[in-house]
């Protein structure tokens, strides 16, 4: 009988693609994923897996280059977020259909944060697409999701590794994947970095991105851009410490760490590399796993 595993997937932007390699390696080693919870990109990968679309989603990610990633972004002048998200999320709908969470083949949970009512929102029923859309609405980047009485943003603000919301069953083990670990980047030899053949075009696109940003913050551009980065770094720091506390309180049986320096949050064009990094991290943790022991963050 296969060992059942309750799987928890953290947020982390493009680093979350590493979750795919982790899942593939867990299954290769004979584990059966019996439930999954996730935040932000973790909610995306977990949702795609629960829908049985992981291979299809991975193959699509592998087609992305820098230009395709940029073209998925529809900029808005809304000061609540730089990107409206319609283009991106309509693409995501190809893999995450508007199905009810209750009908998925395994229990699933996604986390968002309600900034009006100052509370965590955990999706365990209703539309999986709505759950994913809310969970990955990173503040200042994607526009938030309005509800009847609230406003939902990325769950990483309040719980970036929802280890306390994954469904448990008797005799399962708890596996957590943290793609924001404060460790040195560890890349397998086989992982290849994207070539710079289109670098000049990409740089133009990046300049266009900052032009849009400066239109939203028109005065003292340099200071405002610094302020924008400060917000994101502050959110990242807050999320990091909340994650560390959660992992201390709910120590998993297997903790799989991927460095926060593995790639940038928007480097989705490095999908193939990130899958291999996730696979490599999983192998290392599985090799050191001893049944009955708990793994602490480091």
Image (spheres, rainbow, N blue to C red):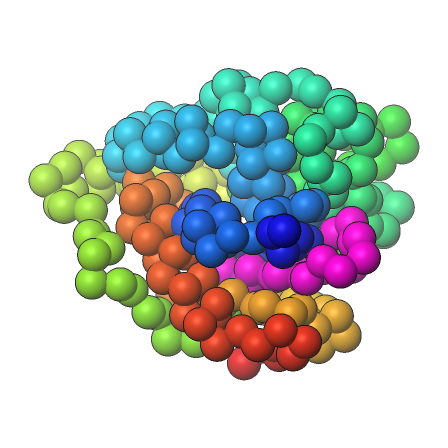
Residue located at (13% from left, 45% from top):
196
Residue located at (69% from left, 31% from top):
105
Residue placed furthest toward the left: 197
> Is residue 11 on the magenta stretch?
no
Task: Answer yes or no: is residue 231 visible.
Answer: no
On the image, the x and y values in percent for residue 81 come to 58, 37
Residue placed furthest toward the front: 1
First to last magenta residue range? 160-179
* Residue 241 horizontal side relative to residue 58, left or right: right
Residues 95 and 27: in front is 27
Q: How many numbered marks have been drawn onto this rendered protein structure? A: 0
* Residue 41 horizontal side relative to residue 66, left or right: right
Dominant secondary-structure state across the stretch colored magenta: loop
On the image, the x and y values in percent for residue 208 come to 31, 35
Residues 102 and 98: in front is 102
From the viewer's perspective, is residue 153 above or below residue 279? above
């Amino acid at each position: 009988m296969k060992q059942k595993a309750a799987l928890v997937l953290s947020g982390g932007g493009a680093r979350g693609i590493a979750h795919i390699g982790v899942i593939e390696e867990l299954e290769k080693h004979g584990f059966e994923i019996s439930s999954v919870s996730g935040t932000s990109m973790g909610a995306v990968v977990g949702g795609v897996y629960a829908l049985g679309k992981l291979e299809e989603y991975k193959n699509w990610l592998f087609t992305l280059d820098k230009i395709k990633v940029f073209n998925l972004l529809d900029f808005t002048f809304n000061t609540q977020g730089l990107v409206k998200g319609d283009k991106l999320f309509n693409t995501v709908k190809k893999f995450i259909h508007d199905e009810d969470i209750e009908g998925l083949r395994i229990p699933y949970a996604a986390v968002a944060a309600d900034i009006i009512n100052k509370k965590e929102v955990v999706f365990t029923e209703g539309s999986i697409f709505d759950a994913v859309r809310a969970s990955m609405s990173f503040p200042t980047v994607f526009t938030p999701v309005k509800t009847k009485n609230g406003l939902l943003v990325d769950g990483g603000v309040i719980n970036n590794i929802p280890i306390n919301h994954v469904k448990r069953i008797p005799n399962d083990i708890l596996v957590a994947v943290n793609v924001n670990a404060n460790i040195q980047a560890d890349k397998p030899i086989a992982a290849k970095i994207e070539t710079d053949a289109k670098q000049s075009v990409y740089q133009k696109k990046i300049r266009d991105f900052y032009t849009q940003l400066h239109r939203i913050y028109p005065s003292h551009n340099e200071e405002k851009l610094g302020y924008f980065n400060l917000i994101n770094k502050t959110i990242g720091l807050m999320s990091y410490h909340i994650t560390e506390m959660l992992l201390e309180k709910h120590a998993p049986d297997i903790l799989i760490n991927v460095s926060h320096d593995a790639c940038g949050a928007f480097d989705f064009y490095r999908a193939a590399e990130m899958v291999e990094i996730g696979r490599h991290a999983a192998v290392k943790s599985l090799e050191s796993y001893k049944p009955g022991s708990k793994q602490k963050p480091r």
